[in-house]
Structures are given as C-alpha cells and as structure tokens.
Amino acid sequence: MSSGDSLEDLFNRGLKLRREVLGAEYVDKSMAGANDFMLAFQHITTEWCWGYAWDRPGLDRRTRSMLNLAMLTALNRSAEIKLHVRGAVNNGVTVDEIKEILMHATIYCGIPAGLDAFKAANEVLLQMGVLQPNATEADEKAR
C-alpha cells in the first residue's frame, strides 16, 4: 500500500485478488448476499485483508495460503479452513503440502484443533477432486 492508496483502490485490488484466490463465484455470492449490516464486513475484509495484507510484497500467494492454514488451525476455524484449502490449491499448494502443514500445526495447536482442520480439509479436497476417497467411502457413495 502506498500513501496515495484510497480505500477504493484497496477495495478494487482486494476484490480482484480475493476473486482470484477464493474463486469469483464464492466472492460474488458473498458480496451479493450482504445486507447493509454485513456489507461493512465485506468492505473491511476486501480492503484490508485482501487489498492490503494479501497484496503486500515479500510473500507470494502460495506462502500466504500455507500460513493461513496453520493460523486457522490454531484458531480452530474449520469454516475458514475449508475456504482457504480451496484457495491454497488455487495458489499451487499440493495435497501433500496441506497434509504436512496440518500435521505440523496439530503438534503445536493440539489434537482437537488438528482433527477439525483435517476433517475440513479432507471434505474440500474430496469435493475438488484432488483427493480420492478410500475404497470404503467410494463403495458407500455408490450404494
């Protein structure tokens, strides 16, 4: 962010970046579904989280995604983990890297937080088709 950046500049940069990482469909739905009360949150998230923090030099998107997964595990925020697993894959983080990030975070954050993170990530990775279900899961879905 330069000293000449306005909130509108931050918002526009943030919206572009947010759509690239999280997916345009998700972001557009979040923005369109926001009432006046929630629109304030959409703006602060888009301007400061995406337009400022995610757009800073020094770390690439892939690294930022990996950090987010670890921090969200520490905070035990499975809904956000689901969202950011999708973003991490979009940013080039592999399934094996996601697994290792969550394993490492589990050691420092505790088994309950790690379990929730693994469950959330597994659900999204299966939905995205980048992780294959085991034979038992596949058989149950076929029934």
Image (tube, rainbow, N blue to C red):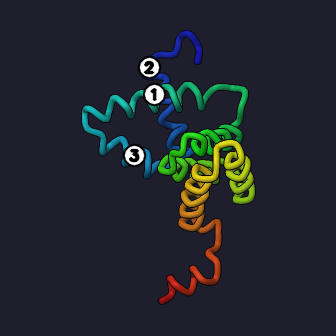
Q: Is the Cβ of the residue at disc 2 closer than 8 Å to that at disc 3?
A: no
The residues bearing labels 1 and 3 have C-alpha atoms spaced at a distance of 14 Å
Of the pair 29 and 111, the residue shown nearer to us = 111
Name the residue tied to disc 1: 11
Q: How many numbered discs sit on the rendered protein?
A: 3
Q: Is residue 92 visible?
A: no
Residue 74, x across and y down, in percent = 60, 41
SS for callout 2: helix
Name the residue tied to disc 3: 28
Name the residue tied to disc 2: 7
Residue 25, x across and y down, in percent = 43, 52
Mark 1 surroundings within 10 Å by alpha-carbon count, few (fewer than 14), some (14 through 19), many (20 or more)? many
Residue 135 occupies quadrant: bottom right
Of the pair 104 and 108, the residue shown nearer to us = 108
Q: Which amino acid does label 3 sit on?
A: Asp
Residue 87, x across and y down, in percent = 58, 48
Q: What residue type is labelled 2?
A: Leu
Residue 110, above or below 4: below
User: Could you tell me which residue is drawn at 64 percent across and 68 percent down?
Assistant: 131
Say whether disc 2 or disc 3 marks the residue closer to the N-terminus: 2
Q: Quadrant of the N terminus?
A: top right
Q: Which amino acid does label 1 sit on?
A: Phe
Say whether disc 1 or disc 3 marks the residue closer to the N-terminus: 1
